[in-house]
Image (cartoon, grey):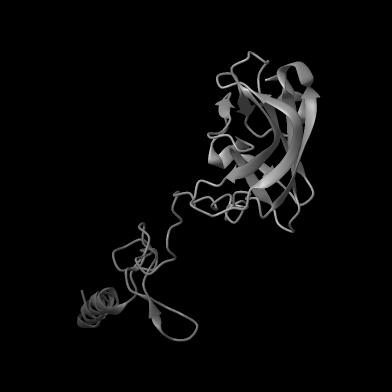
Amino acid sequence: MSTVRKAAIALAAVSALALTACGPTEDGAAGGPGTPSASPTVSPSGSATAAPSATPSKSGAPKKTATPTKPPKSGGADPDYDVFPCSTFDVTFTASLAEPTTSSYLLKITNKGTKACRALGHPIVTFGDLDGQATERGAAPGIEDALRLEPGQSAYAGLMGGANDGKGKTVNSIALTMNTESDLAQTPLKASTPGFYVSPTKNSVTAWMNNAEDALSL
């Protein structure tokens, strides 16, 4: 082989080695274009941003919780908080004969004021100049369920003096005060009851009711 040919072969080998060491790598090779880069990407603004991760970032939007909100409180202020018990200053009073043989009378009060009031329990009834008062007949609702009287409304109670048994006395008037569950001083309201017989053991009065029929049937 001639010297020129040997020199050409040697030069070709050197050139091939130089291209292998300095030239681009093949696609898919380590560091080649086909391999995903782990380096940060560049945003349009020019700042580097981290690659997306599989877990949410701590700086992301807060998660919504499943805890229900508390329902609004119902009710509000008690509409009857300022409705006081009726006293004799709040009402007018009448008594009408219902049954002569038992000296039964229908008692009626009417709210004459401009505000509602409550007719509590039983009326307090005294007989003329006799000592004592009418005994209570039947149960009465508690203060929270007591009869509410709007202005102009009435309440009723049934008063029974009892049949003439020869042991009682006759009076021509009665006086009424209201149960206020307090020490409020009241002016008694009087009503005429001609020939009203008061038996010492059978006289009684019902609690206040919203109609005359119930007051007289108890």
Locate the C terminus and report the quarter of the image it occupies.
top right
Q: Which residue is drawn at 44% across and 65% down?
A: 61
The residue most toward the bottom is 46
Q: Position of residue 13 (x, y in %)?
A: 24, 75
Picture quadrant where residue 205 is located: top right
Q: Which residue is drawn at 23% across and 79% down?
A: 14
Viewer-proximal residue among 23 and 209: 209
Q: Residue at x 50, y 82 (%)?
A: 44
Q: Where is residue 142 in the image (x, y as percent from the top left)?
A: 54, 36
Drawn side of residue 84 relative to residue 21, left or right: right
Picture layout, residue 187 above or below residue 209: below
Viewer-proximal residue among 157 and 99: 99
Locate the N terminus and report the quarter of the image it occupies.
bottom left
Q: Position of residue 49 (x, y in %)?
A: 39, 76
Viewer-proximal residue among 32 and 184: 184
Q: Where is residue 213 in the image (x, y as percent from the top left)?
A: 77, 25
Viewer-proximal residue among 138 and 29: 138
Picture layout, residue 4 above or below residue 208: below
Q: How many numbered discs, if any? A: 0
Picture quadrant where residue 144 is located: top right
Picture quadrant where residue 135 is located: top right
Q: Residue at x 71, y 50 (%)?
A: 91
Picture layout, residue 159 above or below residue 177: above
Picture layout, residue 29 above or below residue 191: below
Drawn side of residue 126 relative to residue 103, left or right: left
